[in-house]
Image (cartoon, rainbow, N blue to C red):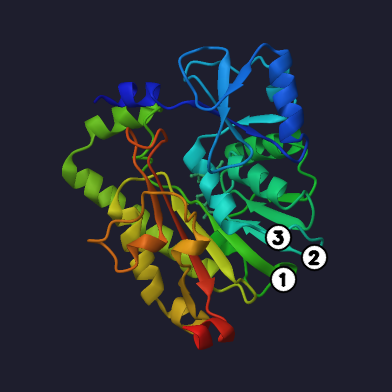
Amino acid sequence: QSADVRAAQIPRYVRVNTSMWSVSAALEYLASCGYTLRDCVSSDPKAFARDEHIPSLLLFPPQTAFHNDPAYKAGKLILQDKASCFPAVVLAPPSQPLVRVIDATAAPGNKTTHLSALMGNTGKLFAFERDRKRFGTLSMMVSRAGCTNVDPVNADFLTVDPQDAKYADVTHILLDPSCSGSGIVNRLDYLLESEEDSQEEEDERLEKLAAFQLLMIRHAMKFPKVTKIVYSTCSIHAMENERVVVAALACDEAREGQFVLAGRDEVLPAWHRRGLPEEMESADSVVRCKPGEDATNGFFVSCFVRQSKKRKADG
Ligand code: SAM
């Protein structure tokens, strides 16, 4: 199956931005636009469905265009692949005024706006983006989505001092760093790139990315009060996924901070596809999405938690 055939099978996913709108108001609006809610998405261009795993996510036929839709333009609807909604749901930041969260690699801001909505637009979400141009996109998206609890910062996360008083109370960190993008089947630029690269160049590129990804996790583990770190990629390569997680669990920061992998019950238990068992012992604790089979792009999600005294006693 070619990548464009696989891409055509991916529904048009639309997330209701619950910072601005309720799902029921969105359903009423869509009905007023002539759409009919059905049990599952079909080829009927006027039918749509609700997602079974992400409560705020709606599914439309793949070719459905939303770019001129007033609700999309107003930031009430966000176009976001299903798998890309998983990290914020797994991080599950509490909705409380004193909660402090970091999105370490935020642009263009799909997961930032999702986190903000899950936080009920309360507390504080520091959203770092090192690239200036992409930071502009992030700021625009955050403002359009009405995320008043987000503080966008144009900085390299690796230069942020974990001991800085500003971040002393950060408990949740989302890490969705640059990756090979090898899971993305609806972006033709990646396909062109991969066809040009030799195997050797590709391996070298993956090694560099994996080293960077590991560095980012290790840095996140240094924040004194962090209890939960979600690491995700849109890569299908074990080198950027399971192997990075295994290396992270063995690093000094994980041992000193007593970080372990969250169990399956905390990481989308209802999702069928898990990690590669040949790559790690607790592959059941991490989530994979397979392009062409799961009606999503390729994706990987893992979750590190600080082992509390209670957890240790239980275990
Ligand atoms: N989470 C984003 C979303 O859902 O919209 C997508 C993030 S994208 C995969 C990775 C982003 O991280 C890129 O915009 C990249 O410029 C940024 N980035 C990479 N390294 C970074 C670093 N050290 N500090 C901050 N941002 C970084």
- Quadrant location of the N terminus in the rendered image: top left
Q: Secondary structure at mark 3?
A: loop
| Left/right of residue 216 with respect to residue 159 in the rendered view | left
Q: Position of residue 301 (x, y in %)?
A: 45, 54
- Label 2–label 1 contact, CB within 8 A: yes
How many angstroms separate mark 2 from mark 1 (CA)? 8 Å
Q: Amino acid at mark 3?
A: Pro
Q: Position of residue 166 (x, y in %)?
A: 74, 67
Give the residue at mark 3: 94
Local packing at callout 1 (Cα closer than 10 Å; few below 14, some 14-19, many 20+) is: some
Q: Nearer the viewer, mark 2 or mark 1?
A: 2
Residue at the farthest left position: 199
Give the residue at mark 1: 169
Mark nearer the N terminus (2 vs 1): 2
Residue 237 shows in this picture: yes
- Residue at 58% across, 58% down: 91
Q: Amino acid at mark 1?
A: Asp
| Residue 300 vs residue 168, the one in the foreground | 300
- Residue at 71% across, 39% down: 142
Q: Nearer the viewer, mark 1 or mark 3?
A: 3
Give the residue at mark 2: 98
